Amino acid sequence: MSKQEMPTIAPSNIPVLPQGFIDELRSMIDQTRESIAVAVNSKLTMLYWHIGNKVRKEILNNQRAEYGQEIVSTVSRQLMNYYGKGFSDKNLRRMIHFGETFPDEQILSTLLRQLSWSHFTLLMPIKDPIKRDFYAEMCRIEKWNVRTLSKKIDSMLFERTALSKKPDALARIELDTLHKKDQLTPDLVFRDPYVLEFLNLDDHYVEKDLEDAIMRELEQFLLEVGVGFSFLARQKRIVVGNLDFHLDLLFFHRRLRRLVAIELKIGDFKPEYKGQMELYLRWLDKHERQSGEESPIGLILCTSKNHECIELLELDKAGIHVAEYLTALPSKEILRQKLQQASRQARLRLEESAHE
């Protein structure tokens, strides 16, 4: 038999490793590498903050980077000689802007537990401090990666929350509470409108089609409604005496610590929807609410709504939120105009009620 034809015999003295042993070692290595990367990113981001502040305070005398354009360029050239392109003119100006945008070191340290330098580069161009702080805090609480943060900003998430329609002073109180206590409120959780273009519905759908599509695309639906929602039931049976009712969708929100009942409607919001939802919420409160949970709240999704009708019904006092949903994604400009108009109207109604 030639050398090439000799059979290969596996050595008999190789020990057999316990099942899953290598996977456990790999997990240990990967977790350590990830924690090291997070720590390094955090340290670098804080370094950029300190550099930007030092240049701004000691070289620019607290003026904006544009004030000392030549000075910043000189500092950049000197640093690049030692440390390379990471300290280019553009990057150094971004560090200065970073210090201007996030002046509180304590707040920054809290954000750094979750946010990377790439997160901050997306947040810095946002001029409205309420809007910027909303995205920063929600990013920290819901642990968004950079791609998710970018999508949330592009989808105008802030403008779709009730927070954006409040006076700045009230909005700031909610954000401060979120930062200090990690305490979410329904105004931070619920959106209006919800963008459900991923359901791929045609122009002639009925409520069952909408519900079926949500169940098919439940993962996408949960991404749209936000982190913290857990699906519990579809067509939840509610028995009152000898009457049977069925709630479309039932969720639980972990941070709000309460059941969330969702009803799906085609067309305009109608006043009778309030009584229906109130019945469901009271039944859930009596039969499903667990010890330590807050009272259940409701979300009615409609294709359109009358703001005055909703105000007169005082739905907020009943723990009921009404939001529109879109089954086709509008252009960003059309969505912006729609949201700006809704925000102006909401602020005007708040001002009128304050003067009554």
Image (spheres, grey):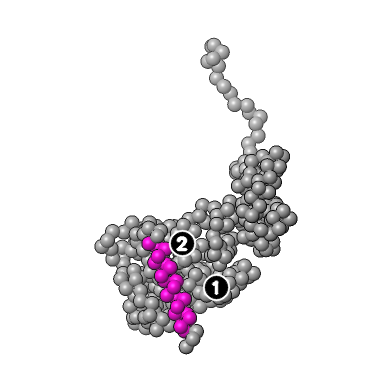
308 part of magenta stretch: no
Distance between the Cα atoms at labels 1 and 2?
18 Å
Say which residue appears at 66% left-offset and 58% top-offset.
Answer: 63
Q: Relative to 138, does residue 25 appear above or below in the rendering? A: above
Q: How many marks?
A: 2
Instruction: Please state which of residues 258 and 180 is positioned toward the viewer in this rendering.
Output: 180
Q: Nearer the viewer, mark 1 or mark 2?
A: 1
Judge the density around disc 2: few (<14), some (14-19), many (≥20) Cα neighbours within 10 Å. Answer: some
Q: Which mark is residue 168?
A: 1
Q: What stretch is highlighted in magenta?
A: 334-353
Q: Relative to 2, does residue 328 appear above or below in the rendering? A: below
Q: Residue placed farthest to the top in the image?
A: 2
Q: Is mark 1 on a helix, strand or loop?
A: helix
Mark 1: amino acid: Asp
Q: Quadrant of residue 214?
A: bottom left
Q: Is residue 196 visible?
A: no
Judge the density around disc 1: few (<14), some (14-19), many (≥20) Cα neighbours within 10 Å. Answer: few
Say which residue appears at 49% left-offset and 70% top-offset.
Answer: 164
349 part of magenta stretch: yes
Q: Residue 240 carries which label?
A: none
Q: What element carries label 2?
A: loop
Labels 1 and 2: the sequence-earlier one: 2
Q: Is residue 217 shown left or right of residue 11?
A: left
Question: Label 2 belongs to which residue?
Answer: 156
Q: Is the magenta stretch mostly helix, strand or loop?
A: helix
Instruction: Please state which of residues 97 and 17 is positioned toward the viewer in this rendering.
Output: 97
Q: Residue placed farthest to the bottom in the image?
A: 356
Q: Is residue 154 visible?
A: yes
Residue 251 x %, y %: 46, 68
Residue 312 x %, y %: 39, 84
Instruction: Please state which of residues 39 and 283 is positioned toward the viewer in this rendering.
Output: 39
